[in-house]
Image (cartoon, grey):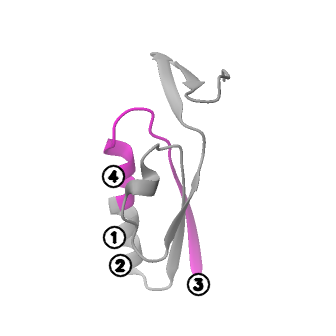
Amino acid sequence: MRRLLVYSHDTFGLGNIRRMLAICEHLVEADVDLSILLITGSPVIHNLRLPARLDYIKLPCLTRRDFENYDVKYLGTKI
């Protein structure tokens, strides 16, 4: 089985994670010998329906402080 690692770290809204899931779904449907691991910080990934042969690793959520600065949303630390 071939494997693919993808990354999508949403800090606001659902657009990026939904788009990445649509891409992943298309890829696993097009290639029955492919499995995908998605790395994400999306706070809603556990609520979304995932296609077969797609799993995820959940990173801490980020929040945007301003245009170029982010903080970890719930851990009380800065990056």
The three-letter amino acid code for the residue at tag 1 is His
Q: CA distance from mark 2 to mark 3?
A: 14 Å
Dot 4 or dot 1, earlier in sequence: 4
Q: Is residue 12 above or below residue 78?
A: below
The three-letter amino acid code for the residue at tag 3 is Met
The three-letter amino acid code for the residue at tag 4 is Arg
Secondary structure, mark 3, is loop
Q: Quadrant of the C terminus?
A: top right
Report the magenta residues as a range: 1-21
Residue for badge 2: 29
Dot 2 or dot 3, earlier in sequence: 3
Residue for badge 3: 1
Residue for badge 4: 18
Dot 4 or dot 2, earlier in sequence: 4
The image quarter containing residue 77 is top right
Q: Is residue 60 above or below residue 19?
A: above
Whether 78 is among the magenta residues is no
Q: Is residue 62 above or below residue 40?
A: above
Residue for badge 1: 26
